[in-house]
Image (spheres, rainbow, N blue to C red):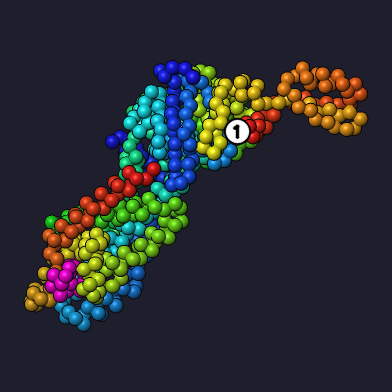
Amino acid sequence: MKAFFNLVNRHLIYFFKDKINVLFTVISLIVVLSLYFLFIKDFTIDAIKQVCPANNIEQFTDQSMLIGLILVTGFSASLGMLNLFIKDISNHVINDFLITPHYKITIYTSYLFASVVIALLFSTLGFFLILFYLKNNYSFNITTFNLIQTYFLIIINCFVSSLLLMIIAFFIKTSQSFATIGNLGATIIGFIIGVYIPLGYYPDTIQSILVMSPLSTIACATRNVFTIDILKDITFNLPSDVMHEIQKVFGCTLSFNNDVLSLNQLYQVIFGLLFFIIVVYIIIQQLKT
Amino acid sequence: MGDSMNNMIEVKDLCKQYKKFKAIDNISFTLQKGKTLAFLGLNGAGKSTTLNILSTLLNQSSGSVKIANYNLNNNNINIKKNIGVVFQKNTLDLDFTVYQNLYQRSYLYFQNHNQCISEINRICVLLNITHLLKKPLKNCSGGQIRIIQIARALVHSPKLLILDEPTQGLDPSARKLVWDSIIKIQKQTNLTIFYSTHYMEEVKYADEICCINDGKIIVHDELKTVMNKFSKQKLIIEDNNITKTFSFDNPKSAINELNKHPSLTNFWYIDILLDELFHQISKEF
C-alpha cells in the first residue's frame, strides 16, 4: 500500500508541477460556469417558464443545471491527470515502474486513483463555488442528508469518469490523440448528462438509451437529490404531476420503456454499471502486455 | 555453460510470436553469475524483445526463462527484486531532481524512508554522483542522466543488471564515462551484466558475446573465441604513392608482408575491425 501511495504522490506532484495543465483545468471550470451564466441560463429559464408556471423556477434551474456542470468538471479534470498516464506510456516511463516488484494492476490503478483525487479536488472546488453562489443569491436550503448524498454522487462521478477515461487511455498511444478524444468526450458528455439541453427535451427512446450510460444516471440521481428540497418548496401549492413533470424535463429522473425510474432504481443502475466498468477495466489491464 | 545453480540467466527454447511474425525463434542460452554478456544484433533482430522478456515487461509465446533461479511468469515479483534495468531511453522524471527520482524509485523497493536514504547514499558514492543529487534531472548532461539511470537500476542492489544499448546517442566521452561506471560497479559488486549494444567497440567489456539475427542466435561464445574465429587484422601499405590493403589472420603474416616491401613510405596496422566482426558473423550464418 505504501508503494501505491508513493506512486499516487508522484503522479500528483507531476500534475501540479505542470502549471499550464493546472491552469487549464481551473479555466475549464470557469469556462463551463461562464457559459452557463452567459448563454444557457436565460434560454433554459424562458423555455421552462412556458411549461411550468411555478415560482422560484430560476433557483431550481440554477441548482439543477449548475450541479450538472460540476459533473462535467470531474470528467475534464480526470482528462488532465490521465494525460500523464499516456505520456508515461509513450515515453516508456511506466516501464520503470513495471519492473519494480509490484503487480501491474497496482501501477495502473495508481494513475486511476490520482485521477480520482484530481477530479474530486476540482469538483469539490466547483461544488463549493455553486453552494456559495446559491447561498448568496437565493434562500438556499438543503437537508444535510441530501447534501451528503449529493457529494457522495459527485465522488462516484469522479470515479466513473476516471475509470472510463482510463479504459479509453489503454487504447491510445499519444497524449495528443487522448486530448482530442477527451475533449470530444467532454462535449458529448455535456449533452448526455443534460448540461447544454435539459434531458427532458430528448425523446423517450434516447432517454432509454441514456439509462445505459453511467454518467447520465449519476447526473439524474445527483440532480434528483440536490433539487428535491427546493422542488418541494416551489411545487407546494401545485398538483403533484407538476413536480414529476419538472423533474422529467430537467433530467432529475430518467425513463426506461416509458417507466420513470425512482431514485433507488437509479442507484441500482449506477452500481450495476460501476461493477461492469470495473470488471472491464481489470480485464483490459490484464490483457495489456 | 556451467551448472544450473551457477547460472543467473537460463533461457530455453524461447519464442515470441506476433501473429505470423516470429520476433524470437527458439533461442536458448545461459549466463553464469558474475559474468558479462554482450547481446548483439541489427535493428529488428530480436534484441529488445529478448530484453523486454527478461525484464518481465513482455510475456513469451513459448519456452522457459529462469532468472536468479526463479521461473519467469511464476515468480515475477522475485525476479523483479533481483534485476535492475537501464532502458535505452530515459525513463526518469525530467522535472524532478536527481534525489527525488532516486528516492521515488527506491521507495518502490524498500518502502522505508531511512533505508531509501542509506541506499541512495551508497549508490551515489559508488558512482560518484553525490554532487548531482540536488540538480534537476533536465539540467544534467546525457552522460550524467545515463549514470543516474544506472544508479536507479542498482539502488536496490540487484544481482543482474540489464542494459538496453546503454550508450545510445551519447558522445564518445560520455560513452567512456558510462562504461567506466559500469565496470567499476561490476568489479566492486561482482554483478552479472547483460547488455545489448550497437557499438562494436563495446563488446570488449564482455566475457561472452551472443549474436542474434532474425530472432535466432547465430553465435554465443567467449569474447576471445569469437574474436579469434571471425576477426581479421588489416595492413595498409603506402608504397611509391600506391596504397594497398592486406588482410591477415595473425600478426606474423603481416610482418612477412611488410618485409616484401622494402621501399614502403608508410604503413598502418589495424588490429581488429570490430564493426566488421558482426558483418562477418552475419555473412557466415
Count of labels in the image: 1
Query: Image height check: is A76 above or below A95?
Result: below
Q: Quadrant of the C terminus of chain B?
A: top right
Query: Image height check: is B232 above or below A82?
Result: above
Q: Which quarter of the picture shows residue B68?
A: top left
Residue B146 in view, yes or no: no
Q: Where is residue A120 in the image (x, y as percent from the top left)?
A: 29, 52
Tell me what residue is drawn at x 22 percent, y 51 percent. Answer: A275
Tell me what residue is drawn at x 88 percent, y 33 percent. Answer: B242
Instruction: Please give left or right for residue B91 compared with residue A245 in the image.
Output: right
Q: Where is residue B96 in the image (x, y as percent from the top left)?
A: 46, 40
In the depicted view, which residue is nearer to us: A22 or B169?
B169
Q: Which amino acid type is shown beneath numbered disc 1?
A: Phe
Tell me what residue is drawn at x 44 percent, y 23 percent. Answer: B8
Q: Position of residue B130 (x, y in %)?
A: 50, 27
Q: Position of residue B152 (x, y in %)?
A: 46, 31
Residue B264 in view, yes or no: yes
In the depicted view, which residue is nearer to us: B182 or B278?
B278
Mark 1: give few (<14), some (14-19) or many (20+) Cα within 10 Å: few
Query: Image height check: is A259 above or below A11?
Result: below
In the depicted view, which residue is nearer to us: A27 or B7?
B7
In the depicted view, which residue is nearer to us: B6 or A137?
B6
Tell me what residue is drawn at x 82 percent, y 22 percent. Answer: B257
Using the image, name the chain to which the residue with label 1 belongs. Answer: B
- The residue furthest front is B285
Judged from the image, the secondary structure of the residue bearing numbered disc 1 is: loop
Magenta range is A244-259
Q: Which quarter of the picture shows residue B207?
A: top right
A55 in magenta: no
A249 in magenta: yes
- The residue furthest bottom is A50
Residue under label 1, please give it.
B285
